[in-house]
Amino acid sequence: MEQTVTTSTTKGIVISLILIVIALVSYFLNMNTSSALQYISYAVFILGIIWSVNIYGKQIDHNSTFGNYFAHGFKIAALVTAIMIIYIVIFVYLFPDVREKAMEAAKTRMESKGQLTQEQINQGLVITKKFFMVFIVAGTLLGYLIFGALASLIGAGITKKNPRPIEIDR
């Protein structure tokens, strides 16, 4: 009996839902975004992709190549990235205090370094406020795609490969 293959779409949706739950828990428990929870989210994302590629290999009896495994993992990463961008945009609009908290955190970081004048800090905050959503979307896009590509590479590298040629009946 041949085992059914779980699609990359299904795996991407499951990983996205887990990441959204982690993000919501951290928000409603009032945890700082620079806490270890942020790294836990990336760890869940990376391990989820590596695990997904490995499971995919087992489901197809390891009859594939590095490139096919990588493609499977990267499809998952691309879907998770798209879902997380949509989630973050909706979340920021539903909870506008997130923007204000981020602006306060940015101001605190700039002041703590002591390298900028108050005027430079204010200019930086004006630019950040103006392009806040662009920065959030770009950061999410780059972060998830880079970590997704790395996780796909690792997953493809550690998954057993035993490609067999196609048998043609003659």
Image (cartoon, helix red, strand yellow):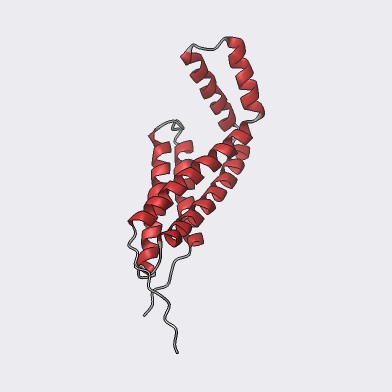
Q: Quadrant of residue 31?
A: top left
- Image quarter in which the C terminus is found: bottom left
Which residue lies at the image location 49% right of the left edge and 20% below the top edge?
A: 109
Is residue 48 visible from the viewing direction of this image?
A: no
Vertical comparison of 80 with 65: above or below: above
Q: Quadrant of the N terminus?
A: bottom left
Name the one closer to the observer, 53 or 160: 160
Q: Is residue 162 above or below residue 71?
A: below
Q: Front-most of 92 and 118?
A: 118
124, above or below 42, in the image? above
Most distant residue in the front direction: 170
Task: Report the residue at 43% width, 77% height from top.
Answer: 166
Residue 150: % across, % down: 42, 47
For this orientation, the residue located farthest to the right is 130
Q: Is residue 52 above or below residue 132?
A: below
**Where is residue 117 shown, x and y percent of the image?**
57, 9
Q: Is residue 92 visible?
A: yes
Percent position of residue 89, x then y: 61, 41
Give residue 29's quadrant in the image.
top left
Residue depicted at 49% across the width and 55% down the height? 76
Q: Position of residue 148 (x, y in %)?
A: 46, 48
In the rendered view, does 53 fall on the left or right side of 94? left
Give the total of numbered labels: 0
